[in-house]
Image: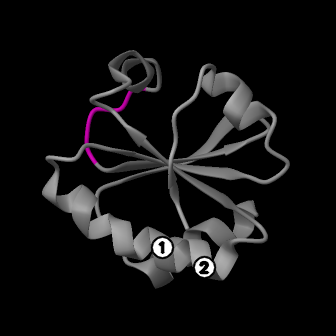
Amino acid sequence: MATKQQFNNFEELIAQSDLPVLVDFYADWCGPCQMMAPILEQVNNQLKDRLRVVKINTDKYPQLASTHHIHALPTLVVFKQGQSVERIEGVIQADALIKRLQPLI
């Protein structure tokens, strides 16, 4: 299951993960973000041994959203060893998302 993440240091969260981290930058009021929730559950279920899915509410962490140049919601960012390696804005279906993630995991 994707988790709503609270943290003290985002850089540690992404840098210390032994798996690539797919971060879903979202907001509760965002309709397309709500559409992504079940899609991310499906992706997480299929890739749970090879990818960590984390949800970050941009309303609670606006500075983090600004730092990572989040201008549209939802925005998915894949981090490997602390570095952003892929960025997807908007709603994407599970099969298309998995296809984009495969080379990264």
Any part of residue 26 in sight: yes
> Residue 84, how many percent across, how many down?
62, 38
Q: Is residue 18 left or right of residue 80?
A: right
Say which of 84 and 46 sits in front.
46
Q: Main secondary structure of the magenta part?
A: loop
Distance (Cα) linking label 1 and label 2: 6 Å
Amino acid under label 2?
Answer: Asn
Place residue 51 in its image quadrant: bottom right
Tell me the SS state at disc 1.
helix
Q: Provide the residue designation for mark 1.
A: 41
Residue 43 x, y percent position in the rendering: 54, 75
Q: Which residue is mark 2?
A: 45
The residue lying at 46 percent from left, 69 percent from top is 40
Q: Judge whether 72 appears above or below 94 on screen.
A: above
Kindly identify the residue that appears in the image at 60 percent across and 79 percent down.
45
- Identified at 25% across, 41% down, the residue is 72
- Is residue 82 visible from the viewing direction of this image? no
Q: Secondary structure at mark 2?
A: helix
Position of residue 6 in the picture relative to residue 32 (left or right): right
Magenta region, residue range: 69-73
Q: Position of residue 90 (x, y in %)?
A: 29, 57
Report x, y in % for residue 22. 58, 53
Task: Report if the CB atoms under discs 1 and 2 are less than 8 Å apart.
Answer: yes
Vertical order, 38 against 89 (above or below): below
Label 2 crowd bin: few (<14), some (14–19), many (20+), radius 10 Å: some
Q: Is residue 65 magenta?
A: no
Amino acid type shown at disc 1: Glu
Q: Quadrant of the N terminus?
A: bottom right
